[in-house]
Image (cartoon, grey):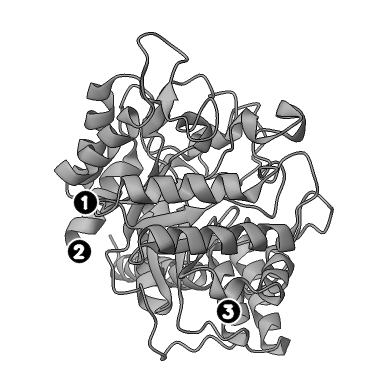
Amino acid sequence: MPKRLIALITCSLALVLVVSYTATRLQTWGFSLTGEENYASQLRGLWNLSGDIFRPRLDLRPDVPISHVDVNPYGINTFLEQEVEEVKRERQVRLISEAGFHWLRQEFPWYDIEIHGKGDFEDRRFEPVRSAWDKYDHIVTLSEKYGLEIIARLSSPPIWTHIDGEAQGSFAPPDNIQDFTDYAAAVVDHYKGRVSYFQIWNEPNIYPEWGETSVNPEAYTELLCATYAAIKSANHQAVVLAGALAPTSELTGRDLNDFIFLERMYAAGAGECFDIMSVQGYGLWSGPTDHRMRPIVINYGRNQFIRDIMVQNGDAHKAIWISEMNWNTVPAGSLLPPTYGRVTLAEQARWVPLAYDRARRDWPWVGVINFWFFKRATDAEKDQTWYYFRMAEADFALLPVYYSMKAHIEDHP
């Protein structure tokens, strides 16, 4: 082969390698700023990002002392109360512990504990009659056995708390707030010395989490403050988390933008009624490295807007804990709508550890980040988009994100 041809081929190959290497580096850089994987989306993201320089700077106060941030950040949401068999509850908790998680965000549904009437903690729905505490006692015992802590979510009223039964919806606040505060105090007292973190409600700013009625920041604040006082009276060492606000740009009666909802909470006096602020940390259509700050667009970094509102209202010393974080893996060929965005199982496995990385590196006001969610008890909801946030199938088949998080936690304890 002529030497000139050999030289030409060598130079061509070298050029291809240089271009390929440069393109890979550029793509990696683009993802680190926009959370987008492909070039076109990255270019659009970089254009959006350039517009952020014209927006007012957020006051995040990253250097002030902040309570409840010096904690293990690894949490996960569970539905252990739905597992009928105790052996399955234990299997789930064991797998979570083996992956390295430290926190279980677990609902203690009011309707499943104070079932038949006020002060009645017996479960007479099935024979034999038993204490309604039994199931939750088992969950708490499992958490202790495997070295986990519980964030107890208190919500979901029983029918007897509404004079019109189910007409207001399953999640509507009770007619009498005192009924809820008494229930919360009962839970706190029952688990005193065993459970210390209690979250009051979930997503009170959207439908249907506040029932078949318009959301109401002032009404939620009244419930929060009354419950805070009751919990502290039952156990002054208990830690109270405000209900996680759903990220939304809606301004309808049934859904209210989380920023406006929080501002109205503060105006109603909520600042004296919680120890930790809760937010949701969904990335939806972009990855955890998306640095774009657009108030009406939801991405993983949205908590910074909440932090700014907290600082403006004198709460720079309080932490934010992320109640739910994940990316949805509804199959590409599915007829289900990608309501919550859509990623592949491989992207989810890669992005979730990056979400923990970014929070620990960039957001000193963030404490716990809870993955949403480990598994459901059955696959009956496979026809619903939200089912595809899971880390394991109903039969305990583990998905790639389980293994990527296990490896991540081992490397970043």
**Residue 260 drawn above or below residue 106:** below
- Amino acid marked by disc 1: Gly
Q: Name the residue under label 3.
A: 310
Quadrant assignment, res 359: bottom left
8 sits to left or right of 328: left
Quadrant for the N terminus, please: bottom left
| Circle nearer the N terminus (2, 1) | 1
The span from disc 3 to disc 1 (Cα, nearest Å) is 31 Å
Q: Are marks 2 and 1 in contact (CB under 8 Å)?
A: yes
Along the viewing direction, whichever of 238 and 121 lies nearer the viewer: 121
The single residue placed furthest to the front in the displayed view is: 119
Residue located at (33% from left, 66% from top): 237
Q: How many marks?
A: 3
Residue located at (25% from left, 57% from top): 408
Badge 3 crowding class, 10 Å Cα cut-off, few under 14, some 14 to 19, many 20 or more, is many
- Amino acid marked by disc 2: Pro
At which x and y percent is residue 192?
29, 52
Q: What element carries label 3?
A: helix
The span from disc 2 to disc 3 (Cα, nearest Å) is 29 Å
At which x and y percent is residue 339?
66, 42
| Circle nearer the N terminus (3, 1) | 1
At which x and y percent is residue 94?
20, 37
236 sits to left or right of 47: left
Q: Which mark is residue 413?
A: 2
Q: Name the residue under label 1.
A: 100
Q: Can residue 287 be seen in this view?
A: no
**Residue 267 drawn above or below residue 124:** below
Along the viewing direction, whichever of 304 and 270 lies nearer the viewer: 270
**Residue 60 drawn above or below residue 186:** below
Quadrant for the C terminus, please: bottom left
